Image: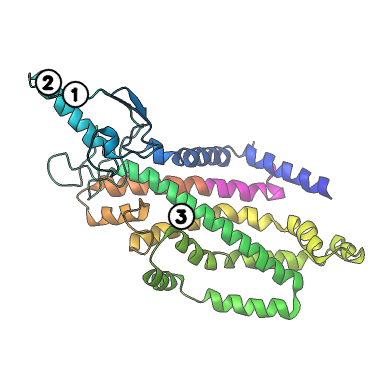
Amino acid sequence: MMFQITQESLNRLKRFRKNKRAFWSLVVLVAAYLLSLTSPWTVNDEPLYLKYNGKSYFPAFVRYSEQDFGGNYQTEADYGKLFAVVRECEEDAAEGFTRAGGCPEIWAVMPPIAHDPLKADLTEEGTPPFAPSARHWLGTDSNGRDVLARLIHGFRICISFSLLLTVLGTFLGIVIGGIQGYLGKFWDTGMQRFIEIWSSLPMLYVVILIGSIYGRSFWLLILIMAAFNWISLSYYMRAEFLKLRGMTYVQSAKVLGLGHRHIFFKEILPNAMTPVVTLFPFTLIGGIGSLTSLDFLGFGLQPPTPSWGELMSQGLNNLYAPWISVSTVAALFITLLLTTFVGEGVRDAMDPKSGDRYV
């Protein structure tokens, strides 16, 4: 039995691999997400390495205070201000005004995108939002924060949120739907009535109500949305378990005296995973869309957390600055499109009749 399952899985993997569009979409998504996980260090205004007066520092990884660089306070060092002070000292020295003690010796290795998504850059003339330039490739938002930096950090948060939400919702859907289908009878009927009542609750109002009481946070949003995200999958798992529990090999396992836990997890569940694998990418899309929608409406993550929905809201409020909305919509469109390609590839790979569809 195990050899047949393994061989079938290998065949499905080969069919997915033959779908070039789905395979490379998955590669791009995974690579982009892995790169975004480094954004707290690679998309930041803190140097990766700093040499100050002969001493080495690693500000992107270790927190230093102003006193470490000759300041008077123990607050976190402002490296932009530190660089400005050194430049001003060097300019004064070039003009013949030498300061006591001379200018500090400083050398730094900056991140590839040296902008903090939470800090405003108001050094340019006029008022934000600022148009794209050599300093800000995609411009700034209405608060002067770099749009590219917020897009990258927002991508990391959005995908992480959706992945956690999908995994948690999938787990609940498998367990609840599997219990319904495995037990059947009045257990199935009673749980199904409860699910129908639970699914009738308006999720948006629940998010607003609980958020107004306990505040908005990443984990609270996941818990609230996961409480509703499992419902659709539970229907499929219930149907699979109802079908498989009557199969000959399951009845044979019962006759042999195998326990319910063994039958549930070892005999039925491995053969009931088709809906889980097929729906996973599309559930991921739903999580991305849900968080973006909540942030757009102002009921999502707490500002100033980088968020695509918040950027779209700024784009709507600043139509004279199209770079905000265009870049955000483009990023969201590409992400959803690639995820859809992956979902279609997985769906075709799970269909035994699609083996010769791609060459």
Q: Earlier in the sequence, mark 3 or mark 2?
A: 2
User: Which region is colored magenta?
Assistant: 341-359
Q: Do we see residue 358 in this rendering?
A: no
Q: Nearer the viewer, residue 214 or 343?
A: 214
Instruction: Give the percent coordinates (x, y) of residue 210.
Output: 42, 71
Q: Quadrant of residue 99?
A: top left
3 or 2: mark nearer the eye: 2
- For mark 2, what is the residue? 93
Colour scheme in use: rainbow
Q: Nearer the viewer, residue 303 or 296?
A: 303
Instruction: Give the percent coordinates (x, y) of residue 169.
Output: 57, 61
Residue at left offset 17%, top offset 39%:
123
- 357 part of magenta stretch: yes
Q: Is residue 199 above or below residue 125?
A: below
User: Seen from this angle, which residue lies furthest right?
Assistant: 256
Query: Marks 3/2: CA distance?
Result: 53 Å
Query: Marks 1/3: CA distance?
Result: 50 Å
Q: Quadrant of residue 213?
A: bottom left
| Residue type for callout 2 | Ala
Instruction: Give the percent coordinates (x, y) of residue 318.
Output: 22, 53
| Residue type for callout 1 | Cys
- For mark 3, what is the residue? 288
Secondary structure at badge 2 equals: helix
Q: Do we see residue 67 in this rendering?
A: yes
- For mark 1, what is the residue? 103
| Residue type for callout 3 | Ile
Badge 3 crowding class, 10 Å Cα cut-off, few under 14, some 14 to 19, many 20 or more, is many
Secondary structure at badge 3 equals: helix
Q: Earlier in the sequence, mark 1 or mark 3?
A: 1
Determine contact: label 2, label 1, CB under 8 Å.
yes
